[in-house]
Image (cartoon, grey):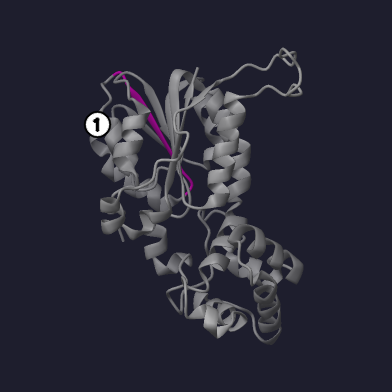
Amino acid sequence: MEFKHKSVLLDETVEYLNIKPDGIYVDGTLGGGGHAYEVCKRLSAKGRFIGIDQDEDAIRAATERLSEFKDRIQIIRANYCEMQKALAEMEIYKVDGIVLDLGVSSYQLDDPMRGFTYRTEDAPLDMRMDKRQNFTAKELVNTYSEMELYRIIRDYGEDKFAKNIAKHIVAARKEKEIETTGELTEIIKAAIPAKIRMSGGHPAKRTFQAIRIELNRELEVLQKSLEDMVGILNPGGRICVITFHSLEDRIVKNIFKKSEYPCTCPRDFPVCVCGKKPLGKALTRKPVVPSEEEIGYNSRSKSAKLRVFERK
């Protein structure tokens, strides 16, 4: 399989980056190199691009796609939470732009053997974004307690049937270890009333999302990394973050707000005494969303939101 799809909110992201030909740009979720290609096209021979991804398939695909720019790029296999360290090892301490396109890629969803999709019956329960990690979705589903399963399905899947789904998973695995995406999907379906299953989206969607987020520590990594990324931007530098569900978007919105309004003084203080200064400003008071045209040719873009912060 290949990374062929057009990156979500591609034109909007590239425009907001306000690319300088001789600047330094980082893509922390390189994927197939869709955003990266458009950035590299706009760089001169003096510009630099660093692509980071933890997925070996993405690294392979992006390396091939970006081969014409090999004089100005460097590709690293790592989680984007290691960005600051990786850049320091290259003696880069400030950059002009950062892109994060969060969540699971279309390639990962379309390859059934990666175990991200609930639409394939006999795929292994994997869901690892980094195959160097030993712990898989299969281990998670078969070892987490009922209370732990309930917590992640409730918090990360925002599913109102989380308690019953967790209960059904635990009951099913007492009879037989849960091994495939199809087995898990059927268990989830049985935990949701038939009337509810007939309306709305796929009944397993929220639980699969929750397991994937927990397994790959997605929200934890974003929460811990984003402030550091704002900190390594040059004056005028911008960070563009694309999210696909409310949990991610809330984290991005709050960190950008905190970076713009860091003062911790009580509201009734006449002047600021905490000494915390704004780092810049959010350029998107409301998130940028895909056009109807984009949603038409890429239905997966429907829930995408882009937020942008510019360093002072």
Question: Which residue does the image show at 70% across and 69% down from the upper left?
Answer: 143
Question: Which residue does the image show at 36% across and 30% down from the upper left?
Answer: 16
Total numbered labels placed on residues in the image: 1
> Quadrant of residue 284 in the image?
top left
> Quadrant of residue 169 in the image?
bottom right
Q: Give how far across and how far down residue 43 sits, in percent.
A: 28, 25
In the rendered structure, the answer to whether residue 219 lies left or right of residue 73 reads right
In the rendered structure, the answer to whether residue 21 lies left or right of residue 236 reads left
Whether 304 is drawn above or below 190: the answer is above
Q: Give how far across and how far down residue 90 sits, in percent.
A: 48, 24
Question: Which residue does the image show at 58% across and 54% down from the upper left?
Answer: 216
In the rendered structure, the answer to whether residue 19 lies left or right of residue 202 reads left
Say whether residue 106 is magenta.
no
Kindly identify the amino acid type of the residue bearing the numbered disc 1: Lys
- Residue that label 1 marks: 41
In the rendered structure, the answer to whether residue 193 lies left or right of residue 100 reads right
Between 142 and 169, the one nearer to me in the picture = 169
Whether 310 is drawn above or below 110: the answer is above
Q: Give how far across and how far down residue 116 sits, in percent.
A: 48, 65
Say whether residue 50 is magenta.
yes
Whether residue 134 is visible here, answered yes or no, is no
Quadrant placement of the N terminus: bottom left
State whether the magenta stretch is mostly helix, strand or loop. strand
Between 217 and 277, the one nearer to me in the picture = 277
Whether residue 293 is visible here, answered yes or no, is yes
Q: Give how far across and how far down residue 89 sits, in percent.
A: 52, 26
Magenta part of the chain = 46-54
Between 240 and 177, the one nearer to me in the picture = 240
